[in-house]
Each structure stands twice: as C-alpha cells, then as structure tokens.
C-alpha cells in the first residue's frame, strides 16, 4: 500500500529558496544530472536504468529512476490509496523509482507549476513529494509534463563517487525532452547518444556531460 507521498527527511534536506534549493547548487554536486547505468549493472535492479539525481553532497546521494514504468498500476490506484476522490482527468505515468521505500511517492514535473514543499528544482524540472501536486494534475491542471515514481535509489557517503569511478555509471545532462518526451525504452540509449558516444562502447566510458 502507498502510505503517502512523503520523503525520508534524513535523505534530503528541505528545499530552501534562500539557499537556491540547497545541495543542488553546491560546487561539485551532481544533483540535476542523469545517472545512466553501464552494462556492468546488468542483472541488477538498475539494468539500463536512467536516474534523475535530486540530492548529492558529502553525506550521500538520492535519485529517482525515470525509465521503469510500473505495469498494472494506474494513477487512479494511487489516488484511491491516498483517499483522493474521483478519477484522474490526465494520464500520469507511474514508475518504479528505486528499491528504497517503495511506499514513498515522488512527482517529477516541469516547472510551469510550483507547489509548496518542492524538494528540488533545476533547469525547468521539479521534484516534489507534495500530494497536492498529484491532486492538481489529476484535476487536469498543473504542470504540462510529469511522472509519479514509487521508491528511490540512495547512496551513502562516497558510495556513488566510488561507483562512478569503477565505471558503473556515467553522468549525462538532464533535459525535459529526455525526462518527459522520450519513450521509456529509448531513454537509456538516447542518454548515451547525447554524449556523442556509440552505445557499443559504453562499457568503457566514465565521465561527465
């Protein structure tokens, strides 16, 4: 059961407008980038995963998988568990966000609409756990683009950096087109192609966009 749309506060500090959304703006932070899984992560829950990072600092990192749609789960099912009345007037894709806290929900959406409680905002993309955003989208209003993710991926201090150095992940610039306007089964290959590399050579690639 989806308990609520909240976020574990120990993983991400609250957004602070005066701090330019906190960790996402700190020097060296990868927040706002895409993590693209290398072939070394095959046969794991991150096979060909594309993860939108919304937290990264010296204490660890947190992101949401954006290319694993959940079968047989509709936004109306989530709304029912949250005791929201009525049926959604818009289609909001539901994704597997990661293996941690699968009963937690996150909405990644474009920035035409901003609600209180925004966790992260950068380059026209917003991450929130505010259930009101879901209500607004379901009512046929709100942001132009969005997806609902259940769960998240998390790393302890230094863990993500170690995995990047070992070649498990490559960093790609996030765009609204990749997040919201690209078919899920194409996000992995097009993310790699955005760097100008051939997919066949991806296993040897480590670096930053």
Image: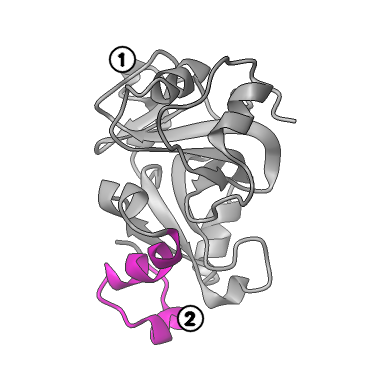
Instruction: Name above or below for residue 169 compared with residue 158.
Output: below
Regarding residue 11, the answer to whether it shows in the image is: no
* Residue 150 at x, y percent in the picture: 61, 39
Q: Residue at x 28, y 33 (%)?
A: 144
Q: CA distance from mark 2 to mark 1?
A: 41 Å
- Labels 2 & 1 near each other (Cβ < 8 A): no
Q: Relative to the observer, which residue lies in front, 6 or 35? A: 6
Sequence-first disc among 2 and 1: 1
Q: Which mark is residue 203?
A: 2
Q: Nearer the viewer, mark 2 or mark 1?
A: 2
SS of the residue under disc 1: helix
SS of the residue under disc 2: helix
Q: How many C-alpha atoms fall within 10 Å of the one at disc 2: few (<14), some, or many (≥20)?
A: some
7 horizontally vs 184: left or right: right
Which stretch is magenta?
Answer: 184-207
Q: Relative to the observer, which residue lies in front, 38 or 18? A: 38
Instruction: Name above or below for residue 69 compared with residue 6.
Output: below
39 horizontally vs 125: left or right: right
* Residue 176 at x, y percent in the picture: 28, 46
Say whether residue 174 is magenta: no
Q: Relative to the observer, which residue lies in front, 183 or 127? A: 183
**Which residue is disc 1 drawn over?**
18
Q: Residue at x 45, y 65 (%)?
A: 185
Q: Residue at x 33, y 68 (%)?
A: 190
4 horizontally vs 147: left or right: right
Q: How is the rendered protein coloured? A: one colour
Magenta region's main secondary structure?
Answer: helix
* Residue 142 at x, y percent in the picture: 32, 23
* Residue 182 at x, y percent in the picture: 33, 57
Q: Residue at x 57, y 63 (%)?
A: 163
152 horizontally vs 185: left or right: right
């Amino acid at each position: 059961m989806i308990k609520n749309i909240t976020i574990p506060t120990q993983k991400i500090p609250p957004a602070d407008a005066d701090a330019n959304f906190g960790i996402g703006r700190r020097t060296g932070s990868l927040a706002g980038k895409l993590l693209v899984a290398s072939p070394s992560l095959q046969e794991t829950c991150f096979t060909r995963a594309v993860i939108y990072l919304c937290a990264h600092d010296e204490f660890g990192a947190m992101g949401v998988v954006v290319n694993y749609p959940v079968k047989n789960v509709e936004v109306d099912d989530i709304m029912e568990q949250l005791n929201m009345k009525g049926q959604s007037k818009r289609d909001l894709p539901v994704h597997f966000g990661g293996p941690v806290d699968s009963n937690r929900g996150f909405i990644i959406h474009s920035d035409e609409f901003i609600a209180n409680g925004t966790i992260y905002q950068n380059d026209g993309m917003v991450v929130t756990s505010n259930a009101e955003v879901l209500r607004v989208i379901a009512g046929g209003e709100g942001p132009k683009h969005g997806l609902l993710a259940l769960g998240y991926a998390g790393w302890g201090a230094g863990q993500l950096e170690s995995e990047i150095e070992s070649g498990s992940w490559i960093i790609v610039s996030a765009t609204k087109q990749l997040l919201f306007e690209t078919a899920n089964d194409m996000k992995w290959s097009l993310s790699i192609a955005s760097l100008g590399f051939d997919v066949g050579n991806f296993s040897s690639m480590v670096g930053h966009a």
